[in-house]
Image (cartoon, rainbow, N blue to C red):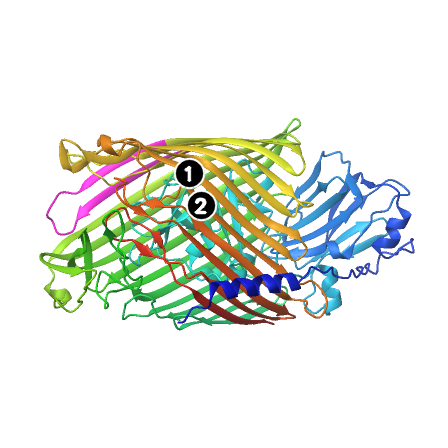
Amino acid sequence: MKSASPLSLSVLLVTIGLLAAPAGAESVPPEPLDRFRSTAPATSVESWLAQADRPTTVTRVVVTPLPDELEIALETPAGQSLLIDANQFRAEGNQLIAEISNANLSLPEGAEFNQADPTSEVSSVRIWQIAPDRIQVVVTGRNGLPTQDVTLATGDLAYGLNVDANASEEELVVTGQRSPSYRVPNASSATGTDTPILETPFSVQVIPQAVLRDQQVINIEDALTNVSGVSYAGSNSGREATVSIRGFGNQYPATVSVLRDGYRLYGSFQAIPEVANLEQIEVLKGPASILYGQIEPGGIINLVSKQPLAEPFYEVELQGGSNELIRPRIDFGGPLTADGSLRYRLNSVYQHQAPFRDFETDTNRFSIAPALAWKISDQTDLSLNLEYIHQKGPSDFGLSRFEDGVAPVDRELIITDPEDSITTDYFSTGYQFEHRFSDNWKIRNGFRYISYDYDYSVVALPLTANGPRVTRFYADQDGEDQSYTLQTSLVGTFKTGSIAHQATIGLDLNRSESRIATLFDRSKPSIINIFDRNYDAVVRPDRSDLPPFNDDLTTANRLGFYLQDQINLTDNLIVVAGLRYDTIGIETEDQLGRREGNNIELSSWTPRLGILYRPLPELSLFANYSQSFRPTTSTGADGSILKPEEGEGFEVGVKAELFDRRLLATLTYFDITKQNVPVTDPDNLLFSVSSGEQRNRGLELDLIGELLPGWKILGSYAYIDSKVTEDTNEALIGNRLYGIPEHKATLWTTYEIQSGSFKGLGFGAGFEYASDRYGNLANDYKIGDYFIGNAAIFYQRDNYRFALNFRNFTDETYIKSTVGSNTGLEVGTPFTVTGSASIRF
């Protein structure tokens, strides 16, 4: 494909951006419900403001569940009226939000009002002071937007907050139907409960579905690059998508755990997730074994799936673009019964794309993900889910090293064979059950079965690179992973005197089986010259001609028990404390019978403590300490499995809501140490000892939200000081961990015209930057830095949306990741264009 001129494209984007000046939308006042009658003639914000000379005080909040309605009454002193502006009503995700100007809270409960589980459809009601003269009402639905009527009552008037799918365009302005916000106020990955991010004393970032849509994200790594301290760590030659967090997780098999709805696949590899079924992506940073057991100390990634919907919803999308991309997608949902007690969601996508490198195999991928939600009673819910992903595509081992850098060859070059490919199958199914004993206590129970299989064709495995010569050996490998997980937690809210608690008691059980069988012929090397390559120099062997190399089965049984308490010591002082105990039994077997197996029993205690102070409603100061552990299968000279790696982390930071609390900024300093890292035994180079130590510390900044109506922004910056602090090889001490940039920054911003003839037209632009990185732990060669520019133009009106995205419009040649050797340098995607058209009905 011929690339567009970067200069001309940049000029075009700047010109369009200057022409698209922000414009305000007209306000249409909401219509009061019939059973309320207004005693005041004013029906607009302007006329009310003319009557008001000071902010109105809300002295009491009363939440009343009615048979088919939830009423939220805001009480004010006699003679005072609240100013209701319809433009401040909106729906975001599963939340109904109303902002009320010229108002302040003075409640018996303190600085804000919170009520959990007022009805079976509503998980929480929160009212808080978002600015000195502005309050916000947030009604969070349990499984999407509430279908029951939610009314906001003030004086003699009440206003419906629900979105009416059949409303006219003017009525939709009233109920706040607009482009979804980038700002997600709550997340569950940090505490296991749906907690406001501003009240969480840990660093957690959320990438919402709106970002995935605006950036036209197809690969999970393109979404995660938006988060500070997260770097892509490679596809493991097509087996999985891996990332590092805060410098940890890029050294196989010590990879970052990728969870789906809180469940993980224990095994050798984690598969490549499908983004079409995701509602949002949550990144929890720092050691977090308290909730998730054995993990890397950098953090975890939780992929949150789309849930069944209470209202009918149908979306069809077609994407197409560079490298023969074609990607049709459907997203259907709604009630299956008249009373809405049974709901469904169905997501499915097919993707075909040709490689931009010299492979003969195109990528073909299919995914389907149905889900059901059953409201058994007002107190009990049950959901069922399934996901299946099949993919066949190239097995890419990247480029090779040359002297003290990357080989100076075209990015299309491959160092294996054009026919090399891999086929993967991922399957997951399970249930989630919740029963609410009362407004204060509930139990949750869930099960998830996950299987993942991969099968290489016979590939030319590149093992060594010496100058222009890459030595390859033909090999074949099959892998099978199965994981069974059962999780149960009891969550309760109560008070001890004036101190409020939200306590969680959890138990999780897991059994996993992982088998890897490799065929490998070391007697017939195939050598290729990267400057004068001839792929046909050696005849490709049949699978049956390759001798067995290994066939290993690893079985593990895990039991974890944890206690956690979220404690509100005062209205603005929060403490989160927890303790977890894990016991793990691991058995390894050689299915070829060439060596004896190993058995190991491990146990570990991991604590966690976080504290958060809110001097202002829009400002939080926090600090935390936590630990993690991860068993290893590395063995010592005596044949025993080495003790687990242990992580320890400290973090301090500040979270602030800016621009009338539309923008969330998070600034943190972290210091994480990983001990018991397996390193080479100096007395026996074929084995390892647990004497290594690595330390990463640095600063992170994340910005997400809306600067003005229609102007959204997502930005990040990370500085990481990464070092080997202990090793049996003294030459490595003080070196940086490979693949970790010292500086990494991203920015993405969009503006959508809010009114007039061009309403719905929008533009986006951004960049990704990473400083140079070392290619291996010896730090004897470097991978260059990179800066890539991205842009978008889109138009949405009524139920239609059209978009055109330009990725890497500067056509930068760069390396995305390294596996720490002289090969496996994964190449970044060149300039690509992706177009899409979608309709919702």
Q: Which residue is mark 2?
A: 744
CB under 8 Å between callouts 1 and 2? Answer: yes
Residue 427 image position (x, y, % from top left) = 37, 60
> In the picture, which quadrant includes the C terminus?
bottom right
Please say if 645 is above or below 420. above
Query: Nearer the N terminus, badge 1 or badge 2?
Result: 1
> In the picture, which quadrant includes the N terminus?
bottom left
Q: Decide: few, some or many residues near mark 1? Use Cα within 10 Å; few <14, some 14-19, many ≥20.
A: many
The answer to whether 437 appears left or right of 320 in the picture is: right
Write the start and end of the magenta stretch as one range.
580-604
Please say if 23 is above or below 623. below
Location of residue 418 (image quadrant): bottom left
Q: Which residue is mark 1?
A: 720
Q: Decide: few, some or many residues near mark 2? Use Cα within 10 Å; few <14, some 14-19, many ≥20.
A: many
The answer to whether 514 appears left or right of 338 in the picture is: left
* C-alpha span from label 1 to label 2: 9 Å
The amino acid type of the residue labelled 2 equals: Lys
Q: Is residue 333 visible?
A: yes
Q: Is residue 576 visible?
A: no
